[in-house]
Amino acid sequence: MLRTVTNCHGQPIRKLDSIYIGYDPREQRAVEVLINSIERHASRPLNVVTLNAEALRRVGLYRRAPHVDSTVWAETPVDHMKDSIDGRPFSTEFSFSRFLVPFLNQLEGLALFMDCDMYFRGDPCRLFDEFGEMEDLALRCVQHQYDEGGNLVKKMYGCPQTSYSRKNWSSFVLYNCGHPGHHNLTVDDVNTKPGNWLHNFRWLADDEIGDLPEEWNWLDGHSPLEVEPINVHFTSGGPWFGSEDGTSGWQPQREGDQKYCDEWRALAAALDTVAAA
């Protein structure tokens, strides 16, 4: 249960809001830049946790495994991961562990989950302050109407882009962890339910899922260029793939996406400068 803790003057002490970041060891650089962007922009302390699949397995919370014939974890991947439950492809170690967030937050308070291939351009605390009143809602997310379209058939590591309902909704989710709707989800569900059931939040009624403005999960190659993003999401890879000068490897999907690629690289360069000092 939530408790009101007071300081020596009898004033309530606010519990730190938490951000859970999906972690994949192949995306270490992306994680570092994302955390740095949080540190740069946050107007107050936040509790930042990376969802490490190996650690979650060791404590018994995560047991889901890919098909044994999947080879995407090889140094030179030649195939995509296939889930052992539904046989569908997935691309990261946190594709399913993300749904453990309400339990990791002890089924109380607010918690944000976000993919690691993102970076903040504004204060993440605004999300909790402006959208944290959600007594009747179990979660909020940007409700993209997403169509890969065009010739984009692959994403990072050569994994195929797949179509499914509510695509990318689960990539950035503000959870009201104490909402009774989450009582319909169990740790076993996270480990045994088909991916489509999880990514569509099927343990919740539709009216328990609230929305967020698009600037909180702005998708490269998809979101309107006139929207000024607070959080940028690279959905087909990212600037950490390929050469540092951007002349080879990953490239942004649209000319208008280039400035966000440049911003990400500037953040990465600043991190390198600090590390070298």
Image: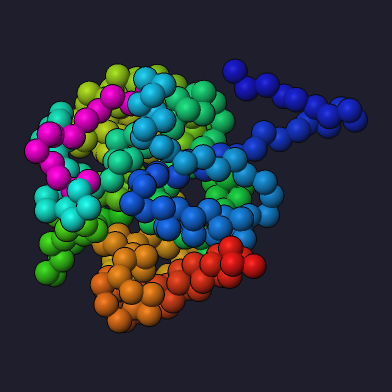
Find residue 179 and report its horizontal and vertical position in percent: 47, 26
Quadrant of res 203: top left
Image quarter of the C terminus: bottom right
Quadrant of res 101: top left
Stretch in magenta: 61-73
Q: Toward the viewer: 62 or 26?
A: 26
Image quarter of the N terminus: top right
Residue 264 at least partly seen = yes
45 sits to left or right of 50: right
In the depicted structure, whether residue 252 falls above or below residue 101: below
Q: Toward the viewer: 124 or 54?
A: 54
Q: Does residue 69 belong to the magenta stretch?
A: yes
Quadrant of res 200: top left
Residue 213 at least partly seen = no
In the depicted structure, whether residue 109 falls above or below residue 80: above
Residue at point 37%, 20% (across, down):
60
Residue at point 42%, 63% (across, down):
232
Q: Toward the viewer: 18 or 246?
A: 246
Q: Does residue 90 belong to the magenta stretch?
A: no
Find residue 138 and report its horizontal and vertical position in percent: 43, 33
Residue at point 15%, 28% (across, down):
85
Find residue 271 and report its horizontal and vertical position in percent: 55, 65
In the depicted structure, whether residue 228 falls above or below residue 189: below
State whether the magenta stretch is mostly helix, strand or loop: loop
Find residue 221 and report its horizontal and vertical position in percent: 28, 69
